[in-house]
């Protein structure tokens, strides 16, 4: 069993990753840049109906959170990652955190680098530790696809408190930190995701002609928000920027949320209401979310949510065996319930 507890665990040829991680820890003079305007996305739903529950509302579920303050927090890889989505391989025993709150995804596998670090400047008051997430060999172990792929890190919410019915209005918040533009992976596209796992019931017709019957099945789905990087800016001519991408609307399509004009901290939240809708919230900085931070609501894919399972993070890379993905830092993921 190997515990990834230091940068030297990654290998001698990974100096590019080291440079990016060093950027996470360096003094934050770039954070003094004046704030630029944030472009708000308008929801196609009536505001009174769409806003739902503000994430961070209700009772904090103390068994479904992590503040990364324990100095002995470590990630235990436990061998090659799973890649069941691509080659039907579940490689056990899966990776997990030393405190038992996080696990590798059997569907896509774990990010290659998961490390507790000192909280970057501007984080939550009193926070000493946060979690850096970054991946290199996304996808099938030992194979390069030369296209962006993703690995998953899952909060063990359902194992700790069970699946939460949307009748209880479950919701979650998390703080997310992004490095300086020069420390991002070079490709245009999604680099990181924050998502919630949901379940609903669907009805499917089986058989033919007079022998048809209706069969109900449980359908998992994963609405969330991604950070999309644009190396040449919004117009392909200006400097780099990023934007939040919402997944998704009632048809399951992605749409653009607020623009990220400068790196730093953001607060991300999602909530689930008894009508089965999913509600998305975003705010620059680390303050608690408010009604003003609502950026959209939907029945993603036309599904009406019935259960909230957990939250998880997607870490992406070009999967070319050479270039690490963008190192993103998260802090204080918390799950709440109104009832």
Image: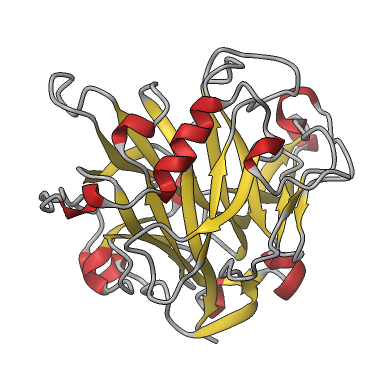
Residue 335 relative to residue 328: left or right: right
**Residue 293, percent across and down?**
25, 65
Coloring scheme of the render?
Answer: secondary structure
Please, is residue 46 above or below residue 53 in the view?
above
**Residue 265, percent across and down?**
33, 56
Residue at 65% over, 14% down? 144
**Residue 306, percent across and down?**
59, 64
Residue at 55% over, 87% down? 339
Residue 28 relative to residue 252: left or right: left
Please, is residue 110 above or below residue 86 in the view?
below
Q: Is residue 107 visible?
A: yes
Q: How many marks?
A: 0
Please, is residue 40 above or below residue 53 in the view?
above
Residue 219 relative to residue 313: left or right: right
Residue 315: image quadrant is top right
**Closest to the observer, 6 or 245:** 6
**Closest to the observer, 182 or 207:** 182
**Residue 18, percent across and down?**
52, 34
Q: Is residue 280 visible?
A: no
Residue at 32% over, 63% down? 122
Residue 100: image quadrant is bottom right
**Closest to the observer, 213 or 33:** 33
Residue at 74% over, 72% down? 160
Please, is residue 326 above or below residue 300 in the view?
above
Quadrant of the image containing the N terminus: top right
């Amino acid at each position: 069993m190997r515990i990834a507890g230091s940068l030297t665990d990654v290998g001698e040829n990974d100096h590019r990753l080291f440079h990016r991680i060093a950027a996470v820890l360096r003094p934050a003079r770039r954070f003094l840049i004046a704030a630029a305007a944030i472009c708000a996305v308008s929801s196609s739903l009536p505001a009174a109906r769409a806003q739902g529950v503000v994430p961070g509302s209700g009772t904090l579920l103390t068994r479904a959170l992590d503040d990364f303050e324990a100095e002995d927090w470590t990630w235990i890889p436990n061998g090659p990652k799973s890649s069941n989505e691509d080659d039907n391989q579940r490689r056990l025993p899966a990776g997990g955190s030393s405190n038992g709150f996080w696990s590798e995804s059997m569907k896509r596998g774990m990010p290659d680098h998961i490390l507790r670090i000192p909280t970057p400047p501007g984080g939550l008051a009193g926070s000493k530790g946060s979690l850096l997430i970054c991946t290199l060999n996304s996808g099938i172990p030992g194979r390069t696809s030369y296209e962006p792929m993703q690995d998953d890190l899952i909060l063990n919410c359902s194992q700790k408190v069970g699946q939460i019915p949307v009748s209880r209005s479950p919701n979650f918040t998390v703080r997310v930190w992004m490095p300086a533009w020069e420390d991002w992976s070079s490709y245009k596209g999604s680099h990181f995701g924050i998502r919630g796992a949901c379940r609903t019931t669907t009805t499917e017709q089986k058989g033919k002609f007079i022998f048809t019957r209706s069969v109900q099945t449980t359908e998992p789905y994963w609405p969330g928000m991604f950070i999309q990087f644009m190396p040449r800016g919004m117009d392909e001519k200006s400097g780099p920027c990023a934007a939040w991408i919402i997944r998704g609307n009632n048809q399951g399509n992605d749409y653009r949320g607020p623009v990220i004009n400068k790196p730093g901290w953001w607060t991300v939240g999602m909530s689930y209401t008894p009508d089965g809708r999913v509600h998305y919230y975003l705010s620059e900085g680390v303050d608690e979310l408010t009604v003003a931070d609502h950026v959209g609501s939907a029945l993603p894919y036309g599904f009406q949510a019935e259960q909230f399972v957990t939250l998880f993070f997607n870490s992406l890379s070009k999967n070319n065996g050479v270039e690490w993905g963008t190192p993103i830092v998260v802090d204080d993921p918390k799950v709440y319930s109104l009832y």
